[in-house]
């Protein structure tokens, strides 16, 4: 007889998106919301899931949601802080988020990459993917658009050195 062994496994995929909360182009001082979505398209539950997300130094005022904890420059979500990560059933999805502010000032065209690592008891590590690009398993990147800042100073000098009175000659620089 022919014996076919069927092995049930989780099959996880993760995407990460970033949104500027004011709806415009990302600029220094803006607040961003990052969303990590985890899907199990496999035939059994994924268990003891841990999401670890290192934070770029150009992001400040990090506020993890959904039970995430910020420690040592990374946000971690696990089954103890986020019960949904204890077991993710087949065809199920879960989402975690955090907000961060873009450090100011930053040079124009600064790129801030961000990518999470997802591990578990019964699957191999996967990386979050930027769904806006065709490249698989790539970091989610934003490009900062800094506004130019200029300072102008105008000085006036009375040619005779005294107080300004009608008829004086003034020099502007």
Image (cartoon, helix red, strand yellow):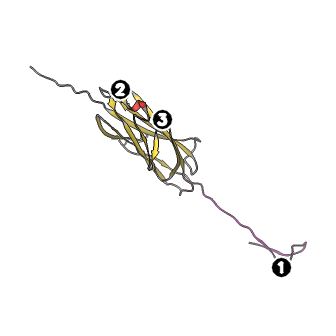
Q: What separation in Å lies between label 2 and label 1 (alpha carbons)?
A: 84 Å
Sequence order check, earlier mark of 1 and 3: 3
Question: What residue would you read off at disc 1?
Answer: 161
Magenta-drawn stretch contains 74: no
Q: What separation in Å lies between label 1 and label 3 (alpha carbons)?
A: 68 Å
Residue 132: which disc? Answer: none
SS category of the residue bearing label 1: loop
Depth order, front residue of 52/131:
52
Residue range of the region highlighted in magenta in the rendering: 146-173
Depth order, front residue of 34/135:
34
Q: Locate the C terminus by quadrant.
A: bottom right
User: Pointer 2 and pointer 1: residues touching (CB < 8 Å)?
Assistant: no
Question: What residue would you read off at disc 3?
Answer: 66
Which picture quadrant has residue 41? top left
- Residue furthest toward the bottom? 160
- Which one is closest to the eye, mark 2 or mark 3? 3
Residue 159: x percent and y percent?
Answer: 82, 78
User: Pointer 2 and pointer 3: residues touching (CB < 8 Å)?
Assistant: no
Q: What separation in Å lies between label 2 and label 3 (alpha carbons)?
A: 18 Å
Answer few, some or many: residues within 10 Å of disc 3's Cα (few below 14, many 20 plus, some between 14 and 19). some
SS category of the residue bearing label 2: loop
Magenta-drawn stretch contains 150: yes
Residue 89: which disc? Answer: 2
Answer few, some or many: residues within 10 Å of disc 2's Cα (few below 14, many 20 plus, some between 14 and 19). some
């Amino acid at each position: 007889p022919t014996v076919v062994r069927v092995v049930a496994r989780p099959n996880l995929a993760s995407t990460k998106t970033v949104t500027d909360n004011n709806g415009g182009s990302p600029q220094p001082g803006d607040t961003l919301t990052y969303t990590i979505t985890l899907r199990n398209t496999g035939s059994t539950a994924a268990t003891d899931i841990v999401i670890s997300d290192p934070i770029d130094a150009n992001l400040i005022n990090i506020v993890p949601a959904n039970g995430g904890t910020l420690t040592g420059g990374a946000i971690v979500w696990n089954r103890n802080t986020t019960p949904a990560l204890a077991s993710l059933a087949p065809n199920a999805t879960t989402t975690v988020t955090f907000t961060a502010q873009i450090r100011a000032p930053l040079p124009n065209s600064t790129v801030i990459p961000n990518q999470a690592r997802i591990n578990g008891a019964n699957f191999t590590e996967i990386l979050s993917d930027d769904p806006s690009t065709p490249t698989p398993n790539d970091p989610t990147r934003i490009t900062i658009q800094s506004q130019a800042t200029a300072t102008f100073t105008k000085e006036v000098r009375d040619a005779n050195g005294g107080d300004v009175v009608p008829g004086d000659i003034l020099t502007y620089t």
